[in-house]
Image (spheres, grey):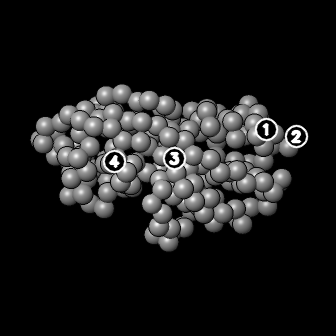
């Protein structure tokens, strides 16, 4: 079976690094899709819709490719959180998050242009946050890292210091569930090892 080029419809360096870690060197084509167009209260529905829209925005640029779109949000007590707008919002978010847990939802959309098939799935991981002093929250927000991430923390950065425990897929929290990606590729008739040749 022909192995198409793997396209990542995301500007996220963390997602790109995750793919590179498992031998996939993606073509990176960030989607310019305006996320504010989608307003949904169910986190699973929201991330899957956004992932699908991002992949669909990039797909027309290619004739034969496998295009992946992803989107992540953190849900705490039924409230959905994406990237904080500013340092003040990030600080407030951490004051509410510390000592509790949230569910990290990541939507994954794969468009296989060579077979004309679209798959959309969601992975959920529960994240438990440490109790923090206000000065620690201030110091973390000052690094700028929380402003770049859904949920105001990066598991692959300073944020890992403040995560006590994870239930579920670890890479999902970074922005892309590698086990789910493997399953989706298998569903399309590929083996993950097929894509190692492209790295």
Residue contact between numbered discs 3 and 2, judged by CB atoms under 8 Å: no
* Residue 59 vertical placement versus 189 (above, below): below
Locate residue 118: give its quadrant.
Answer: bottom right
Residue corresponding to mark 4: 77
Residue located 62% across and 37% down the image: 180
Residue corresponding to mark 3: 106
Q: CA distance from mark 4 to mark 2?
A: 45 Å
Residue located 65% across and 51% down the image: 120
* Residue 172 vertical placement versus 27 (above, below): above
* Mark 3 or mark 1: whose residue is earlier in sequence: 3
Q: Position of residue 113 (x, y in %)?
A: 78, 56
Disc 1 crowd rating (10 Å Cα; few below 14, some 14-19, many 20+) is some
Left or right: where does residue 137 sit relative to residue 165?
Answer: left
Q: Of helix, strand and loop, which one carries label 4?
A: loop
Residue corresponding to mark 2: 1
Residue contact between numbered discs 1 and 2, judged by CB atoms under 8 Å: yes
* Mark 4 or mark 2: whose residue is earlier in sequence: 2
Residue located 44% across and 43% down the image: 104
Residue contact between numbered discs 3 and 1, judged by CB atoms under 8 Å: no
* Mark 1 or mark 2: whose residue is earlier in sequence: 2
Q: Quadrant of the C terminus?
A: top right
Q: CA distance from mark 4 to mark 3?
A: 17 Å
Disc 3 crowd rating (10 Å Cα; few below 14, some 14-19, many 20+) is many
Q: Residue furthest right?
A: 1
Disc 2 crowd rating (10 Å Cα; few below 14, some 14-19, many 20+) is few
* Mark 3 or mark 2: whose residue is earlier in sequence: 2
Residue contact between numbered discs 4 and 2, judged by CB atoms under 8 Å: no
Q: Of helix, strand and loop, which one carries label 2?
A: loop
* Mark 4 or mark 1: whose residue is earlier in sequence: 4
Residue corresponding to mark 1: 190
Q: Looking at this view, is 2 or 181 the one in front?
A: 181
Q: CA distance from mark 3 to mark 1?
A: 22 Å
């Amino acid at each position: 079976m022909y192995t198409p080029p793997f396209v990542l419809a995301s500007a996220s360096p963390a997602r790109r690094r995750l793919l590179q870690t498992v031998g996939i060197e993606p073509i990176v084509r960030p989607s310019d899709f305006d996320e504010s167009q989608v307003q949904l209260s169910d986190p699973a529905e929201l991330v899957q819709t956004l992932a699908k829209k991002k992949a669909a925005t990039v797909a027309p640029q290619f004739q034969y490719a496998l295009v992946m779109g992803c989107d992540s949000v953190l849900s705490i007590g039924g409230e959905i959180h994406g990237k904080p707008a500013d340092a003040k919002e990030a600080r407030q978010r951490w004051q509410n998050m510390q000592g509790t847990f949230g569910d990290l939802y990541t939507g994954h959309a794969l468009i296989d242009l060579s077979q004309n098939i679209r798959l959309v799935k969601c992975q959920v991981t529960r994240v438990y946050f440490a109790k923090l002093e206000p000065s620690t929250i201030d110091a973390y927000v000052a690094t700028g890292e929380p402003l770049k991430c859904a949920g105001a923390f990066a598991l692959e950065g300073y944020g890992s210091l403040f995560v006590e425990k994870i239930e579920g897929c670890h890479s999902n929290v970074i922005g892309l569930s590698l086990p789910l990606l493997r399953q989706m590729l298998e569903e399309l008739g590929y083996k993950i090892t097929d894509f190692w040749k492209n790295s």
